[in-house]
Amino acid sequence: MPDFPFERLRRWPDVEATNLFAVDASDRLILDEAAVLLDGAGPDEVVVLEDHYGALTLAAAAQLGSRSGGNPGIRVYQDALSGEHALDRNAADLASTVPELAGLAGAYRHVQVGAELFAGARLVLLQLPRSLAALDELAGAIARHAAPEVTVVAGGRLKHMSLAMNEVLRRHFGEVQVTPARQKSRVLLATQPIRSESAESAESVELVEPARSEWPRSVVHADLGLTVCAHGAAFAGTTIDIGTRYLLEFLDRMKPDAATAIDLGCGTGVLAASLARRRPGLQLLATDQSAAAVASAAATMAANGLAGQVRVLRDDALGAQPDASAELILLNPPFHIGSSVHAGIALKLFEDAARVLRPGGELWTVWNTHLGYRPALTRIVGPTHQVGRNTKFTVTVSTRR
């Protein structure tokens, strides 16, 4: 795609910094490997998965639109809501400033994983997720629902790829080809979908017992009296990460008079479900920007009989919540943005929590001690006190000024 203005694409509203990019070499390689297939694709035959900020979708739409002059009808799935918003903003910007790209904004639509996303698809462009379970769920859905002649062009940066990805794809496709690397990126080509109802589990590539690939998966944690459900891309899967487990020790101390609470960045919903169990009269909101996390959290609430007490919402931080509306917020913030260790995402969550908390409201946060978030929490939210610390994590409570 030598003529597409990749340099115009932005990450916004995701975190932007000099070391964070909206486009990388793997985007260009995927598009180059798919160029001939794109030339042969008809309307509604192209699906784009896990496009970071719109490079794959918009460049493919530009190629399809320039050839046919019509609406290519690209279907797009992005787990991150910030990725969806960035794609939409980039499309609108290019459509309004580059005359030959005026049709970009209407060239695609967002669709969640399922039959509607893949029905009739002959070409799938995929930015490889780092999680094998996420890849397994996507590959299985493509194999079940796409056209028999579908080709998957899946690429990524070499440092994030592994031979295990090839094996996951081979569980769902009869042919997987490995292309030569370029600029520290590589593409895998998968064809001949296997339409069997059974596939090996990809939670670990070492599993050898065949099992039906059903999502979400669930595990009962007897020590917590909780069933945790997870889709493939949900952080920590059906396990409970150690930061969340540490924060659970402080549930009884969290603003005892609160009538409402928010689990910000809820993941599979462990914090919200556990707090709801402890306080049956409390109404909770669990939010996450990840589509997989929100679907997982909703399944966790249903599995534990908490769907009436905990509302689950997909949101970019707390963008849908009004100012000064929350009494209590729980947060276990991520410290990676993609593959980069970066404080930007945590600071964004702190700022939104500060906006949404009422005066006197509490933000309970667990964080890796070496990140030293306490000064930032004090500056952004209000007086912050350490309430717990172990060998790896610190738990703080910040009171809104």
Image: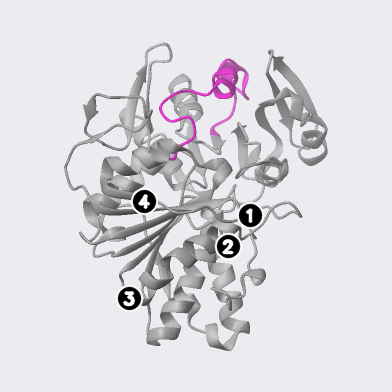
Start and end of the magenta stretch?
233-260
**SS type, badge 4:** strand
At x 24%, y 24%, the residue is 209
Residue placed most toward the observer, 359 or 392: 392
Pointer 3 local density, CA inside 10 Å: few below 14, some 14–19, many at least 20: few
Contact, mark 2 vs mark 3 (Cβ under 8 Å):
no
Q: Decide which of tag 4 and tag 3 comes sooner along the chain.
A: 3
| Mark earlier in primary sequence (1, 3) | 1
Q: Which residue type carries mark 2?
A: Ala
Mark 1–mark 2 contact, CB under 8 Å? yes
Tell me which numbered mark, 1 or 2, is placed earlier along the sequence.
1
Tell me the crowding category of disc 4: few under 14, some 14 to 19, or many 20 or more residues within 10 angstroms, Cα based.
few
Mark sitting on residue 86: 2
213 w.r.t. 82: above or below: above
Q: Which of marks 3 and 2 precedes in the sequence? A: 3
234 in the magenta segment: yes
State which tag comes first along the sequence, 2 or 4: 2
